[in-house]
């Protein structure tokens, strides 16, 4: 077989990460439309990932976060996104490079993307170092969101995407 000097695999992976970046940037600017919400799985120890030592000890390999009702300060840059989430009532700030993301799933429309870890991210997963982030204060939650009462004290739920995959 001929050698792929163009590296179509890299171009396709980067294009799909661009879809993810676009969707998150739109959510950061306008909020989540309709019933859309996102399950994002990433490598916990990948280069550039910033999570608290508490979360890292609970999820030493990979972690899935859900962006739905209770998240704040979503910021999207060219190479990463940052978001505030609450875990068991404790607010946390997470920084997640796009290169660390393994999968993205929007169950409202059954749309998902799976990524092979970037070589640097996979290599960094074996490295025991991680940058510690200070805990951020959670903003005041509105009393109601789209007719549904906001449940105070509930944290983010970490789930396995296998639960939603068709067998």
Image (cartoon, grey):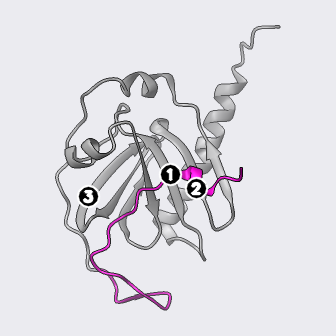
Q: CA distance from mark 1 to mark 2?
A: 6 Å
Q: Residues within 10 Å of mark 3 (few under 14, many from 20)?
A: many
Q: Position of residue 135 (x, y in %)?
A: 18, 57
**139 lies above or below 81:** below
Q: CA distance from mark 2 to mark 3?
A: 25 Å
User: Relative to residue 160, is residue 59 drawn left or right?
Assistant: left
User: Relative to residue 58, is residue 46 drawn left or right?
Assistant: right
At mark 3, the secondary structure is strand
User: Relative to residue 89, is residue 67 drawn left or right?
Assistant: right
Among the 4 quarters of the image, the one containing residue 130: top left
Q: Position of residue 129 (x, y in %)?
A: 24, 29
Task: Answer with mark 2 or mark 3, whichever residue precedes in sequence.
Answer: 3
Q: Residues within 10 Å of mark 1 (few under 14, many from 20)?
A: few
Q: Which residues are magenta?
A: 141-167
Q: Which residue is mark 2?
A: 163
User: Relative to residue 72, is residue 42 drawn left or right?
Assistant: right
Q: Magenta stretch containing residue 119, yes or no? A: no
Q: Magenta stretch containing residue 154, yes or no? A: yes
Whether the residues at callouts 1 and 2 have beta carbons within 8 Å, the answer is yes
Residue closer to the observer: 108 or 84: 108
Q: Residues within 10 Å of mark 2 (few under 14, many from 20)?
A: few
Q: Which residue is mark 1?
A: 160
Task: Answer with mark 1 or mark 3, whichever residue precedes in sequence.
Answer: 3
**Residue at x 64%, y 42% (from the top left corner):** 16
At mark 2, the secondary structure is helix
Whether the residues at callouts 1 and 3 have beta carbons within 8 Å, the answer is no
Q: Position of residue 33 (x, y in %)?
A: 58, 74
Residue farthest to the right, as pictured: 1
Residue closer to the observer: 167 or 137: 167
**Residue at x 39%, y 56% (from the top left corner):** 75
Q: Disc 2 vs disc 3: which is toward the camera?
A: 2
Tell me, for residue 92, which label it has, or none: 3
């Amino acid at each position: 077989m001929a050698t792929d000097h163009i590296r179509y695999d890299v171009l396709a992976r980067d294009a799909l990460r661009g879809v993810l970046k676009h969707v998150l940037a739109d959510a950061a600017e306008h909020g989540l439309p309709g019933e859309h919400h996102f399950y994002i799985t990433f490598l916990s120890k990948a280069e550039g990932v910033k999570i608290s030592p508490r979360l890292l000890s609970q999820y030493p390999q990979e972690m899935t976060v859900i962006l739905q009702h209770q998240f704040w300060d979503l910021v999207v840059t060219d190479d990463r996104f940052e978001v505030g989430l609450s875990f068991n009532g404790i607010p946390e700030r997470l920084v997640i490079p796009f290169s660390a993301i393994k999968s993205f799933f929007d169950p409202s429309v059954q749309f998902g993307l799976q990524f092979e870890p970037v070589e640097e991210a996979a290599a960094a997963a074996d490295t025991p170092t991680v940058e510690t982030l200070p805990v951020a204060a959670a903003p005041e939650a509105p009393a109601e969101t789209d007719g549904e009462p906001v449940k105070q004290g509930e944290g983010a739920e970490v789930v396995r995407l296998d639960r939603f995959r068709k067998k």
